[in-house]
Image (spheres, helix red, strand yellow):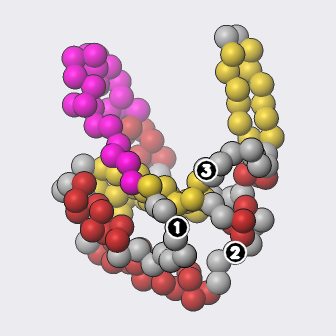
């Protein structure tokens, strides 16, 4: 099972402040444990919303909205993609993360092709597998 782990932003990350060296060291050590166990498939931090944009879709109309997104209540500052045998294993890994201060980290399962049932026809399955392979090849 694959999971996305969403790390929320805070005032410092939204201001573009870099984490302290000791925080980076702790996170690097944790990421090394995840990688060594074969759990971590991907991980990245995100720039503040001031460097981002949103696109609003309304029928044929497309509206670009530049950041920052101060009205957003829950902004993502980073993420991991993990592969674990179960939700319980993913939670066990998350409980070891070097966070503090009441932060809440969101853990969400990622849909797998079989989750879509018969709506994902063999043709659609093949097309999606081809697209995933192309994306992986780009690296």
Q: Which residue is tagged 2?
A: 18
Q: Secondary structure at mark 2?
A: loop
Residue 86 falls in image quadrant:
bottom left
Q: Secondary structure at mark 1?
A: loop
**Mark 1 to mark 3: distance in Å?**
12 Å
Q: Residue furthest top?
A: 60
**Mark 2 to mark 1: distance in Å?**
18 Å
Q: Earlier in the sequence, mark 2 or mark 1?
A: 2
Across and down, in percent, residue 11 comes to: 72, 65
Across and down, in percent, residue 130 comes to: 35, 31
Q: Is residue 35 in view from this perspective?
A: no
Q: Which residue is tagged 1?
A: 103
Q: Main secondary structure of the magenta part?
A: helix
Q: Which residue is tagged 3?
A: 74
Task: Say whether residue 117 is magenta.
Answer: yes
Q: Earlier in the sequence, mark 3 or mark 2?
A: 2
**Is the residue marked by circle 3 packed among few (<14), some (14-19), or many (20+) residues within 10 Å?**
few
Across and down, in percent, residue 53 comes to: 74, 41
Describe residue 97's horizontal placement relative to residue 17 as left or right.
left
**Is the residue marked by circle 1 packed among few (<14), some (14-19), or many (20+) residues within 10 Å?**
few
The residue located at (42%, 38%) in the rendering is 134
Describe residue 89's horizontal placement relative to residue 139 as left or right.
left
Q: Which residues are magenta?
A: 107-131
Q: Earlier in the sequence, mark 1 or mark 3?
A: 3
**Mark 3 to mark 2: distance in Å?**
19 Å
The residue located at (30%, 50%) in the rendering is 2
Q: Report the mark closest to the observer, 3 or 2.
A: 3
């Amino acid at each position: 099972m694959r999971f996305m782990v969403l790390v929320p932003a805070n005032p410092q990350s939204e201001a573009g402040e870099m984490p302290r060296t000791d925080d980076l060291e702790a996170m690097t050590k944790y990421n090394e444990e995840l990688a060594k166990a074969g759990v971590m498939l991907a991980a990245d931090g995100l720039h503040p919303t001031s460097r981002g944009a949103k696109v609003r879709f309304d029928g044929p109309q497309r509206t670009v909205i530049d950041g920052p997104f101060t009205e957003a209540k829950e902004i993502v500052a980073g993420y991991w993609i993990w592969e674990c045998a179960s939700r319980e294993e993913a939670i066990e890994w998350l409980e070891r993360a070097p966070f503090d201060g009441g932060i809440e980290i969101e853990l969400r399962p990622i849909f797998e092709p079989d989750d879509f049932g018969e709506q994902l026809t063999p043709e659609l399955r093949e097309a999606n597998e081809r697209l995933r392979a192309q994306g992986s090849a780009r690296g």
